[in-house]
Amino acid sequence: MSNDEITLAAGDAEVVLAPANGGRVRSLRVGGAELLRQGERYGCFPMVPWCGRIRDGMFRDGGTVHRMPLNAPPHAIHGTARDGVWRVARAEPAEAVLTYDLAAPWPYAGRVTQIASLTADSLTLTMSVETYDSSFPAQVGWHPWFNRNIGGEDARLDFTPAWQEERGEDHLPTGHRIDPKPGPWDDCFGMPGGVDVTLIWPGQLELRVTSREEWAVVYDEQPEAVCVEPQTGPPNGLNTLPRLVTPIDPLEATTTWAWRRP
């Protein structure tokens, strides 16, 4: 099936997927308003097989140390799949399935599947990592760049995390949990009951990001966008909180963005 862009539609919502550009959600328009920052690097890209930074690009699996390219020196960041070409397994008017086969520099074989399901008032993204051979540690997550402004007042965030991961000078968690601090943020937050963050564009739209996962990175240090990133573990989690993908136990996560007009 072609890897050309795919458009999903439901009600007055429209989503454009870009399989050839890292399997990302390139666009989300609701009532004609574009909610995602536009540009080749933006939209919403899948973070897999890891999320955020790996310290010095190195992680250990048993007695083996693996080194990933330092694409955010001195660290490796956001996985490899966002730089790859995904295949279209299925495309329907309001749902599409994309797949990506893990490849070098990632040292393990595996398949990533991402499902995008659109309704008139929500977008649900589901991602899984499967292996048919060696087990390996992995993470999955999403990195949406929501436009800070969609034509009125700037967006504000409403969320109540249980804790914030203390951030070291190297932008990685130190291992200490602290009370949440005011922004601006490039920080990881813990929500044991599941990720639950609402973006509010006053008088225009409210968008609620939820996930069963308990980790979210919030990044709002750039004037153009606000990022709310649900993920299966904290930054550097391949080293500090690895989740093992095995032939009988894939890694799967889901996030839903639900919107409403006030």
Image (cartoon, rainbow, N blue to C red):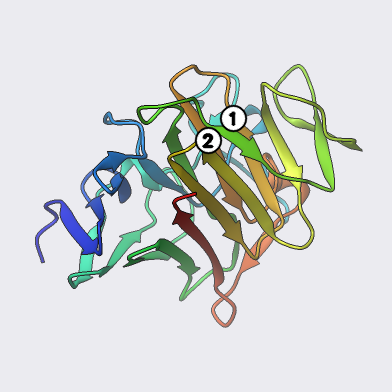
The location of residue 240, given as percent across then percent down, is 77, 47
- Mark 1 neighbour class, 10 Å CA radius: few under 14, some 14 to 19, many 20 or more: many
Q: Position of residue 26 (x, y in %)?
A: 28, 43
Which numbered disc covers residue 219?
1
Q: What residue appears at the point 43 percent right and 40 percent down from the top-left corner?
A: 204
Q: Quadrant of the N terminus?
A: bottom left
Q: Residue at x 54, y 78 (%)?
A: 247
Instruction: Please indicate whether residue 111 sits to the left or right of residue 5 in the image.
Output: right
Question: Badge 2, how many Cα within 10 Å: few under 14, some, many 20+?
Answer: many
Q: Name the quadrant containing residue 118.
A: bottom left
Tell me if I can see residue 58 in this picture. no
Examine the rendering and report whether any part of residue 207 can be seen.
Answer: yes
Is the Cβ of the residue at disc 2 closer than 8 Å to that at disc 1?
Answer: yes
Residue 227's disc number? 2
Horizontally, residue 53 falls left or right of residue 120, namely right
Amino acid type for the residue under numbered disc 1:
Tyr
Relative to residue 203, is residue 98 depicted above or below? below
Residue, x 18% and y 70% (percent of image)?
Answer: 93
| Numbered disc 2: secondary structure | strand
